[in-house]
Amino acid sequence: MNPSLIFQIANGITVIAWLVLILSPNQLKVIRPLRVFVSGLLLGGVYVFALIIGNGQAEGDFSSLESVRSLFANDYFLLAGWIHYLAFDLFLGTWEVEDGIKEGIHRFLLVPILALTFYFGPAGWLLYLVLRLVTKKITKKVKTT
């Protein structure tokens, strides 16, 4: 199968999964299917498929930036790298929502964080951790007064 087509399909599925996560009226019900089936099985399966198909067709490794660039010159390894981002960022987004619910963070505060996590995973996670810390401090302060 053409790696460009797989890329387009994976992106489309991932965008739909993020919209379901953000817009679902009962986020707790969608977290597990998104985490297990979309992020884990579907995207994880595509990731493994891309690695298997691309194996032996690329030079390079993870020992230097130049070697990674050589490795990603192979479309299947480049696809695997992109799918890796999609899967882990979606996994992280489901964790943020689940933890946010446990911590009592309003879902509308999570929307910009989820958008940031979708586009720039670690930056969104960092912002979520800051929001979580601030929310805990405010909650603690309110309880003591």
Image (cartoon, grey):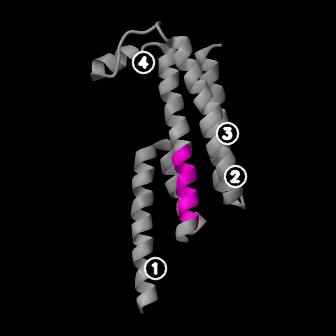
Secondary structure of the residue carrying numbered label 3: helix
Q: What mark, if any, has residue 72 been given in the picture?
A: 4
Mark 2–mark 4 contact, CB under 8 Å? Answer: no
Question: What is the three-letter code of the residue carrying label 1?
Answer: Thr
Relative to 65, is 123 above or below?
A: below
| Circle nearer the viewer, 1 or 3 | 3
Q: Are marks 3 and 4 in contact (CB under 8 Å)?
A: no
Disc nearer the start of the sequence (2/4): 2
Q: Say left or right for 27 vs 67.
A: right
**Quadrant position of the C terminus in the picture:** bottom left
**Nearer-N-terminus badge (2/1):** 2
> Considering only order in the chain, which callout, 4 or 1, is on the residue closer to the N terminus?
4
- Residue 111 seen in the figure: no
The magenta stretch spans which residues?
91-101
Q: Residues within 10 Å of mark 1 (few under 14, many from 20)?
A: few
Q: Which residue is mark 2?
A: 30
Provide the residue designation for mark 1.
139
* Whether residue 127 can be seen here: yes
Expressed as whole percent of the image width and height from the top left, the position of residue 64 reads 27, 22
**Along the horizontal axis of the image, is 38 left or right of 118?**
right
